[in-house]
Image (spheres, rainbow, N blue to C red):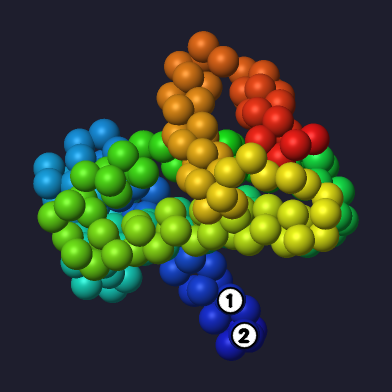
Amino acid sequence: MSHGWAVREDHDRADAERYGQLLEAARESFEELGYGATTIAEITRRAGVSRATFYVYFASKEQVFAVLADQVRERFLRAQDLAGLDPNDVEGVLRLTIETTLEATVECHGLMAVLNHQAVADPAIGELWQEIQRKAVHRTANYVRQQAEAGRVEPVADPESLGLMGAGMNDRYAPLVLAGQVKVEDAVEEMHRIWMACLGR
């Protein structure tokens, strides 16, 4: 005899799988074709589902893109999570966050390019993309500011400017990593050296 909870669990799992398939198909399409050329028909073709199935989970192409943009935001928040780290170990914290934020930039590079482009035409996406970028920079700046106030570092520039510098280095190194021209560990080592110099360490 079938139990209701087991049926519900199977249904929830199937829902989660279809939802994930649609998101993955949408992401691939946006990254390969761009926002304008991506259609619901293309997303459903890649996902191997019907148009009706798409509308079970998303109201529009705009909505699925917004969900993907939010996933980028969450990815960068996780990359800067200091849980389990000694916040006063400046060198350790920066080395790890440099690595995790570079990995996040590499992982999201294709979608970030689409976000940059779409942010110009879509105010809502533009606002979300600015929030993602601002938040990452502010968190870095706040950390540097706190460590400077505690006397552990001596920043050579305004913490906000250093946060922008860090984000810029990630943006520059990510394509080189993707192209196989630079290894992640080498990029992290070089950026860590620059950061330490900028913090008077």
Which of the pair 170/41 is nearer the observer? 170
For the N terminus, the image quarter is bottom right
The circle drawn on residue 1 is none
Residue 143 at x, y = what percent?
Answer: 68, 57
For the residues bearing labels 2 and 1, Cβ distance under 8 angstroms:
yes
Q: Residue at x 82, y 42 (%)?
A: 92
What's the CA distance linking mark 2 and mark 1? 6 Å
- Element class at badge 2: helix
User: Residue placed farthest to the top in the image?
Assistant: 181
Question: What label does residue 5 carry, if any?
Answer: 2
**Which residue is pictured at 66% across the width and 35% down the height?**
198
Asked whether residue 17 appears in the rendered view, the answer is no
| Side of 184 where 53 appears, left or right | left
- The x, y position of residue 90, in whole percent, is 80, 46
Q: Position of residue 140 (x, y in %)?
A: 61, 53
Q: Which residue is mark 1?
A: 9
Q: Toward the viewer: 178 or 87? A: 87
- The part of the image, by quadrant, that contains residue 157 is top right
Side (left or right) of 57 relative to 163: left
Q: Residue at 62% across / 79% down in the picture? A: 6
Kindly identify the amino acid type of the residue bearing the numbered disc 1: Glu
Q: Residues within 10 Å of mark 1 (few under 14, many from 20)?
A: few
